[in-house]
């Protein structure tokens, strides 16, 4: 409901302008609500002499600062690509999310320090009805914040707004804990203020560490989702001219700035211009359906050579014997000069190495020579193997 009222064309989340509106509304909403909560808690906290309430007020002030960062981050991320940044500025969102997470951690450290000091030098806490009113209002406001942020984050898949939602959830827990502490003090006289502050600070620091992981992964580059990979494969392989594909790489520079490349296998006997037109069509379709800027490299495959098919089958047998998880591509055969009345056939291919494994080329070649030995004697041939080890960037 909130987004329907404040965000024009809110359903069109693929539009960068709409995405920026989401960020602007989220940032402005956070600034206004957190400043109000900070002012109210600060007044009540100073009057009551409660470190937990004052710390909660400071936390809201940093939340307002985080909302400013969200606002700035979305504005920077919406800037168009330029000469120095041809892939756009969308990763500013991840940078902003990281700053928000680090800020939250810093608040947790300061809260822990203040709480420990209160245990060493305890002070009387004065609780009034206004204490309960303000803290109750804060919990309700933070619940509304969290729901709104989660709704926005889901709509545009934003790490920075998701971080804001996680921070709001932390605030719900910390404000509820502070409220519980005030109730205990009011009815029993037992001062648990500082101990609650320690518990809340530890919780805030632990959750902030978890918040840091998403933006760091986005900045470093993560493996694309299985859905994205399968969707790309489905579109490319839907054309009968494409026999297979490999070496797919997807780079994500933020929403609306994704780039991919792939090697597509085609019949070597195909008419070049016709196949090129098919490739152009695939690239346009991928861009229209997924927003990914795709570049396709053609790999010709000789389908008429029975000898090539035999060599490939033998090679696959050897590679599978070496490691049944291994896959090969870019397979080519070339006869070279004769040595001692035997034709030297050069077989070259790429083998995909799963992450966590380290292939030894020489041991793989030994397996190949074993498999090809009897065949070579029969055909009076010698073989030479050229192997390239590839990583799988879309596992």
Image (cartoon, helix red, strand yellow):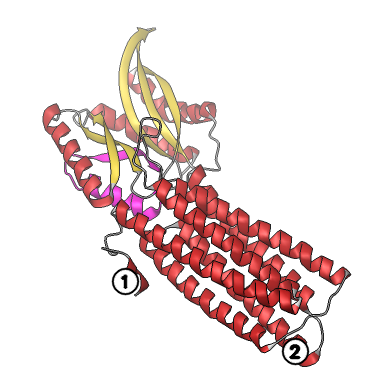
Residue 14 sits in quarter: bottom left
Between 326 and 266, the residue placed more toward the observer is: 266
Does the magenta portion include 366? no
Residue occupying image coordinates x 15% and y 38%: 278
Image position, residue 264 (x, y; %) = 27, 36
Visible in this render: residue 1?
yes
Return the residue found at the far bottom: 187
- Quadrant where the N terminus is found in the figure: bottom left
Residue 5's disc is: 1
Q: Which secondary structure lies at badge 2?
A: helix
Image position, residue 208 (x, y; %) = 61, 60
Decide: is 357 above or below 365.
below
Give the residues drawn in magenta, as a range: 225-254
Image position, residue 48 (x, y; %) = 74, 79
Does the magenta portion include 235? yes
Residue 186's disc is: 2
Residue occupying image coordinates x 38% and y 36%: 328
Residue occupying image coordinates x 56% and y 81%: 137
Q: Is residue 317 left or right of residue 124?
A: left
Q: Is residue 43 left or right of residue 325?
A: right
Residue occupying image coordinates x 45% and y 68%: 150
In primary-sequence order, the first of circles 1 and 2 is: 1
Between 298 and 329, the residue placed more toward the observer is: 298
């Amino acid at each position: 409901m909130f987004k329907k009222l404040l965000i024009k064309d809110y359903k069109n989340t693929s539009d960068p302008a709409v995405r920026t509106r989401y960020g602007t509304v989220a940032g402005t909403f956070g600034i206004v609500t957190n400043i109000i909560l900070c002012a109210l808690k600060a007044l009540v906290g100073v009057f009551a002499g409660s470190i937990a309430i004052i710390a909660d007020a400071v936390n809201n002030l940093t939340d307002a600062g985080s909302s400013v960062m969200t606002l700035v981050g979305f504005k920077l991320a919406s800037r168009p690509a330029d000469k120095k940044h041809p892939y756009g500025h969308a990763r500013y969102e991840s940078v902003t999310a990281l700053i928000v997470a680090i800020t939250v951690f810093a608040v947790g450290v300061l809260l822990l320090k203040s709480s420990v000091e209160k245990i060493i030098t305890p002070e009387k806490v004065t609780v009034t009805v206004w204490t309960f009113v303000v803290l109750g209002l804060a919990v309700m406001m933070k619940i509304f914040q969290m729901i709104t942020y989660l709704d926005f984050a889901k709509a545009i898949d934003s790490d920075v707004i998701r971080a804001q939602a996680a921070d709001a959830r932390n605030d719900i827990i910390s404000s509820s804990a502070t409220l519980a502490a005030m109730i205990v003090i009011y009815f029993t006289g037992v001062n648990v203020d500082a101990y609650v502050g320690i518990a809340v600070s530890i919780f805030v620091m632990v959750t902030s560490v978890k918040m840091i992981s998403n933006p760091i992964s986005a900045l470093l580059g993560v493996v694309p989702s299985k859905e994205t990979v399968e969707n790309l494969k489905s579109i490319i392989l839907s054309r009968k001219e494409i026999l297979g594909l490999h070496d797919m790489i997807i780079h994500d520079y933020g929403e609306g700035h994704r780039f991919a490349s792939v090697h597509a296998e085609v019949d070597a006997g195909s008419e070049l211009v016709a196949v090129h037109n098919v490739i152009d069509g695939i690239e346009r379709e991928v861009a229209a359906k997924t927003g990914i800027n795709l570049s396709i490299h053609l790999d010709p495959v000789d389908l008429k050579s029975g000898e090539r098919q035999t060599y490939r089958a033998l090679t696959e047998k050897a590679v599978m014997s070496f490691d049944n998880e291994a896959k090969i591509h870019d397979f080519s055969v070339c006869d070279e000069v004769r040595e001692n009345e035997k034709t030297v056939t050069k077989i070259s291919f790429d083998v995909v190495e799963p992450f966590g494994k380290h292939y030894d080329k020489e041991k793989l070649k030994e397996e190949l020579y074993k498999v090809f030995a009897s065949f070579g004697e029969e055909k009076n041939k010698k073989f030479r193997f050229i192997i390239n080890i590839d990583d799988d960037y879309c596992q």
